[in-house]
Amino acid sequence: MTETRRCIVIPAIKKNAVIPDQLVKRLAGITLIQRAIDTARGVVPAQDVIVVTDSQEISLICERNGVRSHYNAGLRFTSLDIITEMKSILRELGNDYGHIIVYRASCPLLTWVDIDDAYRRFLEDEADCLVTVKSVRHRIWEVHQGRLESFLAEDESELVVESKALIIIKSEALDGGNIRHTVPYFLNDRSMEINSYQDWWLCERLLTQRRVVFVVAGYPAIGMGHVFRSLMLAHEISNHKVFFICTRESELAASNIAARDYKTTIQKGELWQDVLELAPDLVINDMLDTSREYMEHLKAANIPVVNFEDEGPGSVLADQVVNALYEEVGKGPKDGTGANFLYGHKYFCLRDEFIQAEQNVFRPEPKCILITFGGTDMPDYTRRTLDAVEPLCRERGIAVRIVTGPGYAHRDELVRHIRTLDNPLLRFEYATNIMSRMMEGVDLAVCSAGRTVYELAHMRIPSIVLAQHEREARHTFARANHGFAYMGVMRKFNAERLRKVFLQLVDEPDRRERLYQRQSRIHFEKNKAKVVGGILKLLKKEKES
């Protein structure tokens, strides 16, 4: 016997099960006992796995898996002290093993990595015993004659309670009084034990979670629309494990995503390598055009891929491409026109806050306008538009709302400028999370040609659209037939032309009403369900394969 030799003991007593036959029922496609055996064999050789059971059926399963079993039809545990309950069996094993790991099959979220890590901690601390635990925060009350009379702690107390998942013990410590040094190993998220049908259902849901990796770009030159869309989609697939990788230049995107408590990293090496390191079951690319090389690596790993706003050479390799901002098919790769390419505004995903918002009613005399140019607005069209139309609004008593995004770099200058205007009807919002509220009660907007135009159309706000670059100019939804006065690409800001169009829509209500009526025929409410349904369908296919 050597002290470094170890074995894993799996108690599998059917009489102690809380659910009939729970050890041999399939949980997420695998029986509890089979899952436990597989996990144990990831740590030690099969001959060092011993299952203690009262079931002939489980003994047969052990035989077919090449692991040992200790069968006794009369076995039953009557206490929570598993070491005492199995002491005679463990002492016998102690003749051959210096360390014994007791692992419960009723904790199916535990992995072989957890067991290995716990054993490493056990060795490093030179412990006699290691016990898996979880921390909980509770207020503790005292019960006196059936009543809660006082609590024992003024504040919430952090308690450490035992998890049944693992106990690691030195064989020489099995005799009473020899356990002098016991260390905890915190499991927390993976400590769930099956003690009820509800626990069973929760474990099954957790075990069937898939890993979805979003690859996102967001920085001043391209704006933050990709970030907002990816976050919206991530919220819709919250039953799965979601990870974000932001492209190397997308620190702005990474900080915004991490603020929502998603696991977020920034590209370190080759992007495809960073993605594959996360072992995804599905990849969602929202970073504009993809390269063929990048996509080939993902497809070689047999990973389903969904791309958004992608017209690059890699798009033809995606399982699904959603180009909602482009109304016309055939503007991308030569063969980018198949059934997996979804073009047009019928695939634009509207955020829930807009679905719940109150759409605007047409008012012949406008009372409020909105100025917004997306998440970054590098050329500062926001301030230039304000200077062009604010005097006109002041004359007519029209309120002005200005909304900028988290990447807007001119915030301080704009705030100082607004103060000098001294207009009580002027309101400024920076990086708001309630854009729909900013659009409620608005009669006319001035904006760029990004995703905001779809939200404006939903809210029934005729708008003047200034494309900030050629790519935005190709977002042809922002045209008169959908309720927009499109002014083209503003290579050089033309304040006089903007004022002219603005006055036409303010002072000639018939023009604005025609645009309003065209928007009233457009509906986005069901689009998100279609897009998310396609994503979940790919996840289901991947799972079945």
Image (spheres, grey):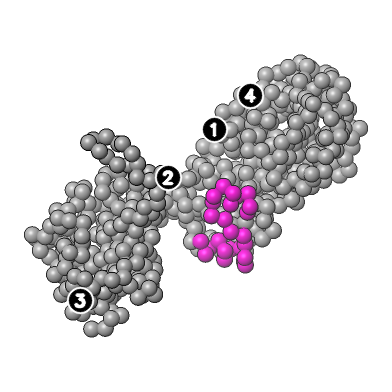
Per the image, the residue denoted by label 2 is 155
Q: Which of 540 and 411 is in front in this view?
A: 411
| Residue segment shown in magenta | 254-278
Counting residues from the start of the chain, the first of labels 3 and 1 encountered is: 3
Q: Is residue 24 above or below residue 349?
A: below
Per the image, the residue denoted by label 1 is 526
Counting residues from the start of the chain, the first of labels 4 and 2 encountered is: 2
Counting residues from the start of the chain, the first of labels 2 and 1 encountered is: 2
| Distance between the alpha carbons at the discs numbered 4 and 3 | 74 Å
Classify residue 397 as left or right of residue 154: right
| Distance between the alpha carbons at the discs numbered 4 and 2 | 46 Å
Looking at numbered disc 1 in the image, what kind of residue is underneath it?
Lys
Counting residues from the start of the chain, the first of labels 4 and 1 encountered is: 4
Q: Where is residue 100 in the image (x, y as percent from the top left)?
A: 25, 72
On whether residue 259 falls in the magenta region, the answer is: yes
Per the image, the residue denoted by label 3 is 94
Q: Where is residue 90 in the image (x, y as percent from the top left)?
A: 18, 71
Q: What element carries label 1?
A: loop
